[in-house]
Image (cartoon, rainbow, N blue to C red):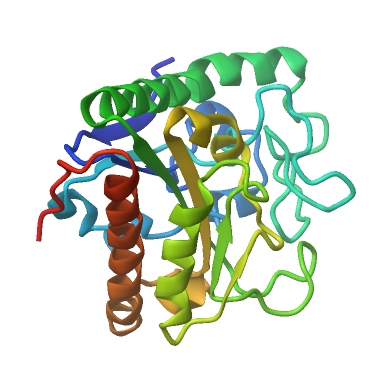
Amino acid sequence: MSTPAIYTLTPGTLPLLISLPHLGTVLPREFSDTMHPKAAITQDTDWHLDRLYGFAQTLGASVLKAHVSRYVIDLNRPPSGESLYPGQTTTSLCPLETFHGEPLYAPGTEPDGAEQRRRLHTYWMPYHKALAQELARLKAANGAVLLWDAHSIASVLPRLFEGRLPDLNLGTNSGQSCGAALIARVAEVVRQSRYCHVLNGRFKGGYITRHYGQPARNVHAIQLEMCQALYMDEAAPFNYLEYRATSVQPVLQSMLRAALAQLANQQTPDIRIEN
């Protein structure tokens, strides 16, 4: 059987890597044949984030895009499968159900341990190898680097959280994955916008943020989980809404520029941010 393209990496020059681990919608036939028809909708995708962050390449950032659906394997979960939010409802490394609790597999066809290990080797490891290598390249070239792990989610999901999420949910693993001055600059941009936000609330950052963020080694990581209602229709077919996207994109750009400016002030005064 052929393996679909797992990711696309577009290298940049600035010390900024934008990771889109839940962008993928590809369900290889070997999985889709045994999955519940509902899985084909891939409703828990971080829809259209490549389009929303379309300015990133012009800015000079590196962009890493996943192609395979999180229903196959979640690239933002630990390879061990342990929960990052003990005691809270969340999805696993190889999810068995949707965010709404709907089963993804017909009874008796769920991936066993051997299958999960195969998916880890085939899909998870290549993405993380590319991510780690690009971070290392950017740090070597610039002295420091920021990993921006970009996510989006439906604004209301009673099974996962109460009420409506804040518009912009910033996560730094409770301050462990990013320098305090850097995240403060980012949060200040949001405070000056019309969007509500929270820092290290329901979403503190997944495996990518927690594993790669090492500010003491000049590798900073921030996760942004944003409400999809800010830029798209949250109901199928999940249309991109340009009139909403154009309102939030300047805020995203300003957040990234502020982070890069702080990084330049702290570590690399020769960084030039392109206009």
Residue 104 figure quarter: top right
Percent position of residue 17, x then y: 33, 40
Percent position of residue 48, x then y: 36, 60
Residue at point 41% right, 83% down? 193
Percent position of residue 199, x then y: 61, 64
Residue at point 54% right, 75% down? 167
Q: Is residue 182 left or right of residue 200?
A: left
Residue at point 13% right, 48% down? 272
Percent position of residue 171, x then y: 59, 54
- Nearer-the-camera pick, 88 or 39: 88
Seen in the picture, residue 12 relative to 55 is either above or below; the reply is above
Whether residue 233 is visible here, answered yes or no, is no
- Residue extending farthest right: 87
Residue at point 29% right, 52% down? 260
Label total for image: 0
Locate the C terminus and report the quarter of the image it occupies: bottom left
Q: Is residue 100 left or right of residue 177?
A: right
Locate the N terminus and report the quarter of the image it occupies: top left
Seen in the picture, residue 180 relative to 258 is either above or below; the reply is above
- Nearer-the-camera pick, 179 or 52: 179
